Image (cartoon, helix red, strand yellow):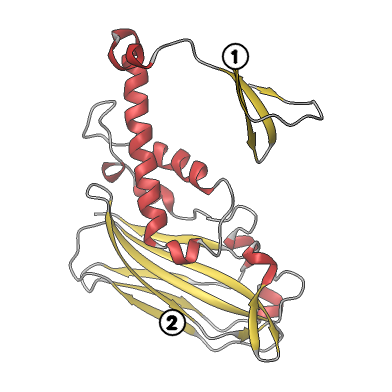
Amino acid sequence: MGKQKSIIEIIGTFGQFTFYKTEDGYLVKRKSSVSKNKIETSPQFQRTRENMQEFGEAGESAKGLRQSILALITLAKDSKLQSRLVKLLMKVLQLDTVNTRGQRIVANGNLLMLAGFDFNRHAELSAVFTAPSTTTIDRVAGTVTIAVPPFNPSLMLRAPEGTTHFKVVTAASEIDFVNKSFNTASATTAALPWDNTVTAPISQVLNLTAGGTLPMFGFLGIQFFESINGNYYPLKNNAFNPLGITKVDQV
């Protein structure tokens, strides 16, 4: 894969080359000479078809996970979130010991690998928020409890310049990766001052399905604000908001 160095920025297909823009700049690649029909039917490309099938499964599962907490992800993400999540879900899928290669699915893989995943690589939760927290999943009761003991925001919360307040956001989801459906609950604290005032303990109990058998996830994030005349405005277009998966429970 080549990188364009010309001062003329080109996007599109010209002859055997395709020019396109990415976060890393303007790139160029040569078009494949292999026909779509050959890839879909030739025994020579059996392995390619298997990889494509599983890549598609990982992509759909990543989409389902994102949609389950879309309101939070919209406020805490980076431009490569989908590709990073698909890459990780491919590793999850490859640990499916039930199905054969090409038929492996995320639901049968090791979903515990998702614990600790950050939706915004520019603001990792563990680096931004150093206060202790616990996520407890009670599958019998169908609850996910996320608790944060009292903490000093100025010492344990790395806030971007201009921050006056912040909110702690939590969510829980149970996701059916096979049927592409989900059930989600979420909660948000009031706007808290970013100063030396120690917070009250935070405990959010999020209700899902009692006795459920689907994978369950806990999420924790921070949203930063600037207060002006009693109104709260998101900081830096939400670029510094962290959001992470704190716990996964898989039957």
Mark sitting on residue 169: none
Say whether residue 92 is visible: no
247 and 15: which is toward the camera: 15
Q: Which residue is mark 1?
A: 15
Tell me the amino acid under the disc marked 1.
Gly
Reply above or below: 61 against 4.
below
Which residue is situated farthest in the right direction here? 7
Q: Nearer the viewer, mark 2 or mark 1?
A: 1
Q: What residue is shown at x 37% (from left), y 17% (from top)?
A: 36
Q: What residue is shown at x 29% (from left), y 26% (from top)?
A: 102
Please identify the quarter of the rendering in which residue 156 is found: bottom right
Tell me the amino acid under the disc marked 2.
Ser
Say whether residue 109 is visible: yes
Q: Position of residue 26 (x, y in %)?
A: 69, 32
66 and 87: which is toward the camera: 66
Label 2, label 1: how far apart the Cα atoms are: 60 Å
Mark sitting on residue 203: 2
Please identify the quarter of the rendering in which residue 129 is found: bottom right
Residue 20 relative to residue 109: left or right: right
Reply above or below: 69 against 52.
below
Reply above or below: 219 against 226.
above
Q: What residue is shown at x 34% (from left), y 8% (from top)?
A: 44
Please identify the quarter of the rendering in which residue 128 is found: bottom right
Q: What residue is shown at x 28% (from left), y 49% (from top)?
A: 177
